[in-house]
Image (cartoon, grey):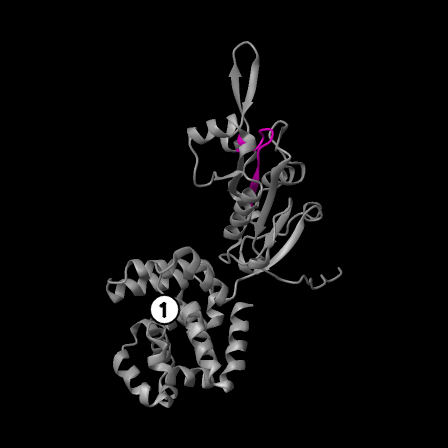
Amino acid sequence: MPQKEERFRPGLKISDLFSLEDKFILIGPPGVGKTERIRQLARDEALSKGRQFVDLSEDFSEEIVVKVKSEPGKYYLFLRIPATHFFPEDVQYPVVVSGRGFKHLIPEKLELFTLQNVAGVIFIDELNNVQDDKQITALFTLIQEKEFGWGYKLAKDVKVVSAGNPSEWSAVARELPAPLVNRMTVLEVEPPSVEEWSRYMDSVHGDNYEKLVVAYLMVYRDDLLKPPVNPGEPFPSPRAWTELALLLKKYSNAPDKFKEALVYGRVGGEAGAKFMSLLRTRIDVARVLAELKSSPEKFDELDINAKILVVHALTQQRVKEYEKIIVHIVRRHREFAMLLIVMGGSKMLLELMSIASVRAELTEMVKKLTAYIQR
């Protein structure tokens, strides 16, 4: 039997997914933002078409049904369907019609996508986790023919987009049938960088999340996404860190034992232990900052968790007051200089540029750091 050749496709950052096309399938690890990106692109397309965006996965009522049916050309619909929930018998069921035999009813959400002039996206998630051949056949028909049930057809401006996980990330992932793959555009997507994840958190959640999570990930970058050590165990992913950052902010005054349970319950043992070490680190930040004002080289002697906490504190201070230590960090500690810029945002960046303008030796360094972070 001939051996399988190793496949190669260039990875696409999830943030670089530019537009949605019919029959796209995104293959990437769980929790990297596939659903979020597809929903955002659908929302952007609705805006460009001058249509009202309606996410039927989250907002569905009789009032919406009436509005869409009365003016379908006004709306752009979005619906996420977990592939394992899609059974042929669920999309058509017979009802007795007096004197005329049977007619088949279909789910109201799907019916809206069949209305003439409506536009939108049906997003089929976890496509390659489906084990039942009858389900795969029904999904094949929906994706390829835009049909389901007894001849119900999606409107021409409705796209069907899918996503799945690589086999190394899912114990139940299966190879999709070759005829189906041959009719789709397969895009292998990569997780966001820590900087991209941080920008997303700032834009969506503002100050309502624990910023120490960003500080930790800027130092331990490989912990942004790691496969589970054992099946069924929590593992770190952008989605897991997002949820953890929100929970830690919500329960900022909770006992350490409760926070520890949250950490291990979201990101697992290995990353959880390292992050808890950071949370448990106790230093007198005000005293350390006072010492560093006159002796910035003492920053070099701090352990890694203390350095993270000091940089986190510096992003909340007036830069001019701590210029010596900030300049020392930019010169000697590139990874912590990047942390300063990411956590301090545009204000910190402008302050650093101002310092660099009168310190020629820092100008090129600040430019390189900024370019790396913003790429």
Q: Provide residue 45's location: percent of width, then percent of height.
A: 57, 45
Is residue 335 something one can see in this rendering? yes
Position of 168 with respect to 331 (left or right) is: right
Position of 364 with respect to 347 (left or right) is: right
Which residue shows up at 57% across the image and 41% down it?
121
**Is residue 41 in the magenta section?**
no
Quadrant of the frame with the N terminus = bottom right
Residue reaching furthest right? 2
Q: Provide residue 340's location: percent of width, then percent of height.
A: 42, 74
Q: Provide residue 243's location: percent of width, then percent of height.
A: 39, 57
Residue reaching furthest top? 99
Q: Provide residue 288's location: percent of width, then percent of height.
A: 29, 83
Quarter residue 344 falls in: bottom left
Figure check: 358 above or below 225: below
Q: Magenta span covers which residues? A: 110-124
Position of 254 with respect to 121 (left or right) is: left
Quadrant of the frame with the C terminus = bottom right
Query: Dot 1 corresponds to which residue?
Result: 212
Q: Nearer the viewer, residue 316 or 61?
A: 316
Q: Nearer the viewer, residue 193 or 267?
A: 193
Which residue shows up at 42% across the image and 84% down it?
327
